[in-house]
Structure formats: structure tokens, C-alpha cells
Amino acid sequence: RAPPPESRKGVGVTLKILETEGVAYIAELLPGSSAWQSSLTIDDRVTHIDGTPVKGKSVAQLTDMLLGEDGSVVELRIDCISKGDGVSSMCRPNRKAQPRIVRLERGRSAMNERKRRDGSL
């Protein structure tokens, strides 16, 4: 059963869609979020969310795919080729681009982790 809409949590990433290619790119990483603490970088190309291709999906559909129950994990498949002039910092130059999987925990943030360690809420 899906959690109520108001209780669904994200991973701290904003996606943008390049209309001409129909694919999604990382536009923003929320400081302290699981996305911020991961290997993701701005302009990384997202090809799949939890195994589902993102091509042709709207921003609203992608947002819905990213949201879920607090503490659950979502997997992003990232192409090493970025739309910018360079490549992602996780890619090796002069090698065939290999996609990578990034697992992110919904609702997790560095602020929440600090509060848990300190014993405060």
C-alpha cells in the first residue's frame, strides 16, 4: 500500500528535462540530503529511476517516481556522459562510458542524522 501523499519523502534532488533529448538531468542537490552526500553531480544524466526508463516522462512523473516512504531507497541509473562540456566527476576519461547506479535513502538528511546522534529531535 502506498503511503499518503503528505508523508512521502524525497531524496534531495531536482531534475530538469532537456526537451530536445527527452532525458533528465540533475539540476540541483539539496544540501545535507542523501543526494548531496552521494556521488551525484549537477548535470549528471539520469536514465532510469528504480529500473524504469525516464525518457519521455514529465517532471511531475519523475518527481512522483522519486517520492516514497521515509527511509525507503530509490535507485538512479546515471550515464557518465553529461550534457555539459565535460563528464561527471565519477567517470574516467578516455574510456567507454559505463552507467552507474546510485542508491538514495528517502527523507534522510545530514541535519536529521546529527539530531539522532545528539539525542535531540
Image (cartoon, helix red, strand yellow):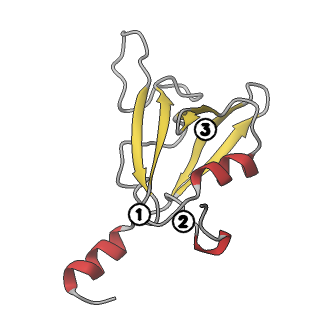
- Per the image, label 2 sits on a secondary structure element best described as loop
Asked whether 26 or 7 is in front, the reply is 7
The residue beneath circle 3 is 25
Q: Are marks 1 and 2 in contact (CB under 8 Å)?
A: yes
Judge left or right: residue 100 versus residue 68.
left
- Density class for disc 3 (Cα within 10 Å; few <14, some 14-19, many ≥20) is many
Instruction: Judge whether 64 appears above or below 56 on screen.
Output: below
Instruction: Judge whether 21 appears above or below 40 on screen.
Output: above
Q: Is residue 47 visible?
A: no
- Disc 2 versus disc 3: nearer the observer: 2
Instruction: Judge whether 15 appears above or below 33 on screen.
Output: above
| Quadrant location of the C terminus in the rendered image | bottom left
- The type of residue carrying mark 3 is Tyr
| Residue occupying the point 49% across, 32% down | 77
- The type of residue carrying mark 1 is Gly
The residue beneath circle 2 is 9
| Residue occupying the point 46% across, 60% down | 106
State how far apart marks 2 and 3 are (Cα): 20 Å
**Residue 102, position as x, y percentages in the image:** 40, 40
**Residue 112, position as x, y percentages in the image:** 35, 75
- Density class for disc 1 (Cα within 10 Å; few <14, some 14-19, many ≥20) is some
- Mark 1 or mark 2: name the one nearer the start of the chain: 2
| Residue occupying the point 59% across, 61% down | 1
Residue 71 - label:
1
Q: Do the residues labelled 1 and 3 touch (CB within 8 Å)?
A: no
Where is residue 109, by image quadrant? bottom left
Q: Farthest bottom residue?
A: 120
State how far apart marks 1 and 2 are (Cα): 8 Å
